[in-house]
Image (spheres, coloured by chain):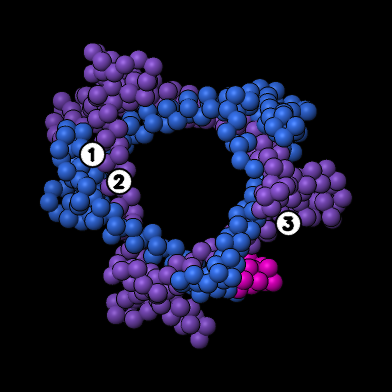
Amino acid sequence: MIETLGIWMAAFLTLCILSFLYKDNPFYKFAEHLFVGLSAAYWAVYYYFNILLPNLIQPLFGHGQLLLIIPLVLGIMMIMRLFPKVGWVSRWPLAFIVGSYSGYNLITYLQSKALEQVRATLVPFIQIESWKNLFTNPGVMTFLNAIAVPVVVVGVTTGVIYFFFSKEHKGVFGGFARIGVWFLMIAFGASFGYTVMARISLLIGRVYFLLHDWLGLIQ
Amino acid sequence: MKKEIPLLITFIAGMVMILQFFIPHRPFSDLQQLFNTWFLIITVFAMILGLGNLFKVHTKRLQRRPKGWWYSIVLLAGFAIMFTVGMVWGPARGTPFDYLFWNVHIPMSSMMFALLAFFVASASYRAFRARTPEATLLLVSAILVMIGRVPLGNYIWDKLPLIGDWIMSYPNMAGQRAIMIGIALGIVSTSLRIILGIERTYLSGK
């Protein structure tokens, strides 16, 4: 009984949101507001049980770790932003968040998103095995595999050149930057296609739910 | 004082986080752990601030009664029910909170994202025009990736799925990598500016 009720609720709310394809209507607005309220509550409960309880409430009030009064006070100062007269005190916790996040990201991004990416690009330009494979078994895929590494090296180098704005994109430098733009366009196109397919698979999942779980029309 | 102390806090917090990478010993390793915990706690309070703002906006709507004000009741009621159920029974599997999550929250969030498929399709139909070589590359790469991931692609030519995968693995990765390197360098310079107090826009406002 409770399971059936859950399926009917899910089906009703799915159809409410789907109705937006016709036009903005009260059913969609109802589902939209319910979604915002529910999501906010979900994350509030999640953060309470997974962060506040084990990291603040239990250690501070259960084990007497008095040092945790500092983040508690900073947290309360953060909420003061809701009151315009004393809102300026929220700058202190904000400064802490911004400072520690900046310090942490400065190193981790430099390490993982810059140096590691450069290191991964510094590979032998000619992959002997791939080229041997191309000459023994010529075809579209063997050709694409043979040129894969040069494509990556040229793509990364020219892409980075495009992002270098301290020099005007003219002449040879401009030509490299243009090639960089082509690679960026391919990347945007591929990401777009990938995102569309992900959304379509979600849609298939919802339609399957309606036709299988709710209506029982397909096996 | 309203700006000097926050700048000092930013500097100390940032420097501790940087130094612990180079000196992974006491007291910096301890300080890093301590700051991480504080960071988590304060971000939860930042979320509470967001919730406070949400309540403020919607209780104002209930007082002023503009058009569609009753949707605010739906929002607040949805919040109250989910929050109460979560706090009373906890978020474990098999609880009423879990039931609401799977039967109300998940269907709505999946459908919200699935809805974007229609809008992306209609927007791309209107905006995608192969007017320049760059636009053509974007269009062709998107079509190859999409068609390579459906049975039709394999039906047209059995190499299409492989070509779609190749585009994702090499030219796409090259572009993404260039973007990532650009982002990383941007983050490094911005972080340095913030820690050293050159960038202060986050302190503006009341």
Chain coloured purple: which letter? Answer: A
Q: Which residues are magenta?
A: B80-94
Q: Residues within 10 Å of mark 1 (few under 14, many from 20)?
A: many
Q: What separation in Å lies between label 1 and label 3 (alpha carbons)? A: 48 Å
Mark 1–mark 3 CB contact (< 8 Å):
no
Is-magenta flag for residue B88?
yes
Q: Earlier in the sequence, mark 3 or mark 2?
A: 3
Label 1 sits on residue: B138
What amino acid is at disc 3? Answer: Leu
The residue depicted at 55 percent of the width and 69 percent of the height is: B64
Query: Do badges 1 and 2 share one subunit?
Result: no
**Residue carrying label 3:** A53
Q: Nearer the viewer, residue A131 or A196?
A: A196
According to the image, label 2 marks what residue? Answer: A192
Q: Answer yes or no: are tags 1 and 3 on the same subunit.
A: no
Secondary structure beneath label 1: helix
> In screen coordinates, is A123 left or right of B89?
left
The amino acid on which the numbered mark 2 sits, given as a three-letter code, is: Phe
Q: Quadrant of residue A94?
A: top right
Viewer-proximal residue among B12 and A118: B12
Q: Colour of chain B?
A: blue
Q: Residue A149 at what x, y percent from top left?
A: 29, 26
